[in-house]
Image (tube, rainbow, N blue to C red):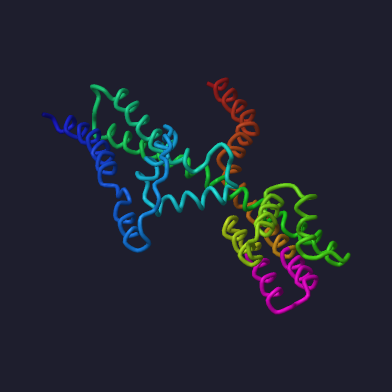
Amino acid sequence: MSPIAIAAALLIMLPLSLLLFQALATDTGTRKVVRQNLIAGPRPAKSKKARTSNENLNDLGRKLAPKSYVVRLQRLLNRAGRPAGMPLQRLLILKPILAVSTFFIGVLLLTGRFSKLGLLILAGAVILAYFIPDVLLDSRGKDRQEEITLELPNTLDQMLIAVEAGLGFESAMSKAAITGKGPLALELRRTLQDIQMGRNRADAYLALVERTEVKDLKSFVRAIVQADKYGIAISRVLRTQADELRTKRRQRAEEKAMKIPVKILFPLIFTILPVLFIVVLSPAIIGVVKMFSGGI
């Protein structure tokens, strides 16, 4: 058998073997049930409900993905705002399907034309197909973080006006969440919902930071938690944080403006200047050619 055929067989058998191993070697929780029975006695038997195909696929997706990778996907989804069309369960199922589909399509395209370069391209395409959802979520999360960073100073100004008018901090946050638009307003509404459900305010604020992972919001939440802990006036904290974040926003804008000439340099050299030279020098070149051809 040729080495190419052996490599193709290994590429097919290894994923199938891994799937079979994961399905057979997964802990079913028997030890946990026995330990619970020994400590607290057997639990009353519950009526088993028929599991749907979606639940079975969700369990299979969680078994195939490592726990650390599932946690990473959770962070990406939180940062991207938990898209309604892409929950974690669907994402865990979609990624292996994309990889397997890409593999079989690549095998069909390379049938009879296997080579080392083709196998490398196929392996790269399979890996890329598996991690494409991660790249899209990461890009969406970064855009969302930038929107939150831009909206935060204006939101703090609104909250400061409400607090100085006599409202409490949570009421001011509620006003900013209702009148505001964008991802920051949505996150503030979710934080207020957590507080209304009985969650500690400090824990709700820290959960807001963990979901968004925005540095400016993290510093603001830390200042609010400390002010609540030590009894510092909220209006003073809001005014200080708003001024600081507005200064940071102006500095970031100046930094981006200073980077623009460097970014324009290469497109200017390789696209605009050649066309400009052609337009300017072509009449002179044509005249020189005609002059020398006429002299000959």
Q: Position of residue 199 (x, y in %)?
A: 63, 62
State the residue lying farthest toward the left: 1
Up/down of 213 relative to 121, above or below: below
Snapshot quadrant of residue 235: bottom right
Up/down of 145 relative to 166, above or below: above
Residue 203 in the magenta stretch? The answer is: no
**Left-right relation of 134 to 145:** left
Please name whichever residue, 153 or 221, is drawn nearer the observer in this view of the structure.
221
**Residue drawn at x 67%, y 60% as measured from the top left:** 195
Please name whichever residue, 246 or 164, is drawn nearer the observer in this view of the structure.
164
Q: Position of residue 292 (x, y in %)?
A: 55, 25
Residue 243 in the magenta stretch? The answer is: yes
Please name whichever residue, 10 or 231, is drawn nearer the observer in this view of the structure.
231
State the residue lying farthest toward the bottom: 230
Region in magenta = 218-245
Q: Position of residue 142 (x, y in %)?
A: 58, 50
**Residue drawn at x 39%, y 47% as measured from the top left:** 45
Q: Position of residue 230 (x, y in %)?
A: 70, 79
**Left-right relation of 210 to 103:** right
Snapshot quadrant of residue 150: bottom right
Up/down of 277 relative to 30, above or below: above
